[in-house]
Amino acid sequence: MSRVKQFLRPGWPWKAAFVLYIAAVAYLCFGSGDDLPSVTFSLFGIPADKLGHFLMFLPFCPLAFLAFSPLRVKSWRCAGILAIITLCGAAMAFGTELVQYFLPTRAMEMKDFAADSAAIVLGSLGSFLCLPCGGRSQTR
C-alpha cells in the first residue's frame, strides 16, 4: 500500500482531528466578539469574515469522510456518503447561525451561511475527486 493511501486510511487519528476541528469551529462561531481578531480587508470584493467562514467550513467534508467512512467503499456509495456528510455540514452551518441569533455578542447572517455552504459543497466535491473513493472499492 502506498504511503499516501496508508495515510488517508480512515481511523481514530482522523476521528480525533474531526473532533478538534468541530471544537475549533464552535469556538470561532460562538466565542464573544472580543475574543476574536478584528479583520477588515476584502479580497476581490469578498469581505474577510466571509472568506473566514469559507475557509473554516472547507475541511468539514474531507475530515468527516476520513473519520467516518468505511475502509472499502464503491464509487457510488462514496458519493452517497459524501452527500449525507454534505447535508450534515449544511445543517451544522445553519445551526451555528441559528445559535448566533440567540447570542448577545453574535449576529445571525445568511451570507455567512451561504459562505459556509459553498465551502461545504466544494469540500465535498474535492473529497470525491481527490480522496481514494473508487480506489478503495473491490470490483469483480
Image: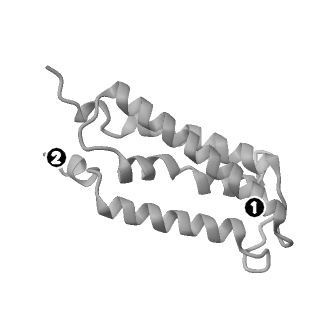
**For mark 2, what is the residue?**
2
Between label 2 and label 1, give the one nearer the viewer.
Answer: 1
Tag 2: amino acid: Ser
Please tell me in which quadrant of the rendered image residue 52 appears.
bottom right
Pick the quarter of the image with the C terminus: top left
Crowdedness of circle 2 by 10 Å Cα count: few (<14), some, many (20+)?
few
First in sequence, mark 2 or 1: give its number.
2
Q: In the image, is residue 33 above or below residue 47?
A: below
Q: In the image, is residue 34 above or below residue 85?
A: below
Please tell me in which quadrant of the rendered image residue 17 appears.
bottom left
Left or right side of 14 for 52: right
Pick the quarter of the image with the N terminus: top left
Crowdedness of circle 1 by 10 Å Cα count: few (<14), some, many (20+)?
some
Tag 1: amino acid: Val
Please tell me in which quadrant of the rendered image residue 99 appears.
bottom right
Seen at 43% across and 31% down, the residue is 80
Cβ–Cβ under 8 Å for marks 2 and 1: no
Label 2: element kind: loop
Label 1: element kind: helix
Position of residue 71 measured from the top left corner of the image (x, y, whole percent): 25, 44
Q: In the image, is residue 101 above or below residue 125?
A: below
Q: Is residue 25 visible?
A: yes
Seen at 55% across and 69% down, the residue is 23
Left or right side of 73 for 91: right
Seen at 80% across and 46% down, the residue is 111
Position of residue 48 measured from the top left corner of the image (x, y, whole percent): 75, 57
**For mark 1, what is the residue?**
99
Residue farthest toward the bottom in the current orientation of the protein: 35
Position of residue 85 measured from the top left corner of the image (x, y, whole percent): 50, 42
Left or right side of 9 for 52: right
Q: CA distance from mark 2 to mark 1?
A: 43 Å
